[in-house]
Amino acid sequence: MALNQNLFNADEGVTYDAIVIGAGVIGPCVATGLARKGKKVLIVERDWALPDRIVGELMQPGGVRALRSLGMVQSINNIEAVPVTGYTVMFNGEKVDIPYPYKSDVEPVHKVKDLVRDGNDQVLDDGHITKKDFETDERERGVAFVHGKFLDNLRAIVRNEPNVTCVQGNCVEVLKDAQNNNEVIGAKIDIEGRGKVDFKAHITFVCDGIFSHFRKELNPEHVPTVGSSFVGMSLYHAKMPTPNHGHVILGNKHMPVIVYQISPEETRILCAFNSAKVPKDLKGWMQKDVQPYIPEALRPSFDDALQAGKFRAMPNSYLPARQNDVIGMCVIGDALNMRHPLTGGGMTVGLHDVVLLMDKIGDLDFSDRATILDELLDLHFERKSHGTVVNVLSIALYSLFAADTPNLKALQRGCFKYFQRGGDCVNVPVQFLSGVLPNPLYLTRVFFAVALYTCYLNIEERGFFGFPLGVLEGFMIFFTAVRVFTPFMLGEYFG
């Protein structure tokens, strides 16, 4: 986008219905939805130029469905996006293909009133995304793309809304009421050529993402924890083992490796490292601990990328959601809630939250701040089923896939063997993974079915004479599964 003077001319004399801080994935969706609901919106972004990041490059079917609900699914068009039809899980050289769920097995897409119109809930044909595949195929589809190009499309959509004013500047402060410091009344924006300008609004939406500066306004203790990292590279002209699939490469001698194609030429590879700080010698670490376990088809492109040495590291953060209990403010997206990126569920959770937000408050009078607060407090509980499943699944699978103890390694192997059984042993888990089955109790049942199956395999392999030891080991494996899964499930669902 070519910058123009309009980005610096927002009127501070207007009291907006809403100020949206941040134009990442969630901010433009919030601003567009509110504008289509008739609200006067100011959206602020530090830099409207094309961003360059390696996060948010694979969207699960649940995220695509949420874009349909918001009438913004055409944001995946005309960016050379790659359709994703499922996952391939590899374990010590073996593999299981896991296609996405049948549309007939999930609820119909919810169309938000006033947001869906003129066919904007359906994709267009663009040479990479085809309407036939996405609209009439019997299975759900996800999509992968270059993150910056996708954001550029979202930003183009929000700029075309007549009720939206876009401003380029750095938000330096969330403004509080002089008489009541617990009420937010707007934001102070540092604008080039104008200095620091106060903008007022009935509701201020904090959508400033992973490294949010303002999530602490919700609570000083609302801070993410970082326990691991991904090291990313771009592979070019890679030969994918299973075209149009995301790939999870597992083994009992290495950390998980994630691979997915994001354009006709470029494929993203993310290599897990079980620490918040990545190794100083990234190339040496990749050569020793990653390269030997890369599938043969990917080795030429991987070796070329390794030689080029263009590594990009990202922290893997976890942040349970808190209630939006501050009058005049709503924190949403990664600023509110983060999970491990292993399962690619971040955009799905954030966009689903936007759908719920539009249904809850889109038609209300934003000047009635007390009513809005009540609805936001309710929203915290309404979002739990969906958010809990995606968040807990990401933590649980990372614990298994990055196994560093004998019991976790047993669970890792048991999980893969469970997938190999086929039928509902893959059909149900992939519904959780793709973000279309928001049922925490069902997730609990399936997770412990995997744990019990692992115990069974262990006892079976011990044989008759090893039965007592097998039972003891099975008990320890099951206890490990409880310890991994239960604290996060309880924290997410009841927190």
Image (cartoon, rainbow, N blue to C red):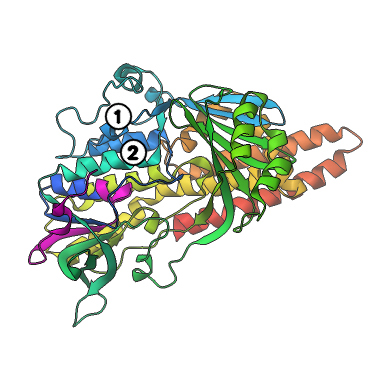
Q: In terms of image quadrants, where is residue 337?
A: bottom left
Q: Which element is circle 2 on? A: helix
| Kind of residue at disc 1 | Asn
Task: Indicate left or right for 391 with 25 as reference.
Answer: right
Instruction: Tell me which numbered mark, 2 or 1, is placed earlier along the sequence.
Output: 1
Q: Is residue 146 above or below residue 52?
A: above
* Point 26% across, 24% down: residue: 124
* Point 27% across, 38% down: residue: 153
| Kind of residue at disc 2 | Phe
Q: In the image as oriented, which residue stretches furthest toward the bottom? A: 179
Residue 59: image location, x then y, percent: 41, 37
Q: In terms of image quadrants, where is residue 36?
A: top left
Residue 118: image location, x then y, percent: 14, 29
Query: Is residue 152 visible in the rendered structure shown here?
Result: yes
Start and end of the magenta stretch?
1-29
Residue 168: image location, x then y, percent: 23, 57
Where is the N terminus found, in terms of image quarters? top left
Residue 209: image location, x then y, percent: 38, 55
Q: Which element is circle 1 on? A: loop
> Between 154 and 264, which is closer to the camera in this rendering?
264
Task: Assess disc 2: are there few (<14), some (14-19) or many (≥20) residues with their C-alpha within 10 Å of its C-alpha.
Answer: many
Q: Is residue 348 above or below residue 103?
A: below
Q: Give the Cα separation between the discs numbered 2 and 1.
A: 8 Å
* Point 64% across, 54% down: residue: 483
Residue beneath disc 1: 77
Is 6 part of what is drawn in magenta? yes
Q: Is residue 251 above or below residue 495?
A: above
Query: Is residue 453 visible in the rendered structure shown here?
Result: no
Task: Indicate left or right for 217 with 249 as reference.
Answer: left
Residue beneath disc 2: 150
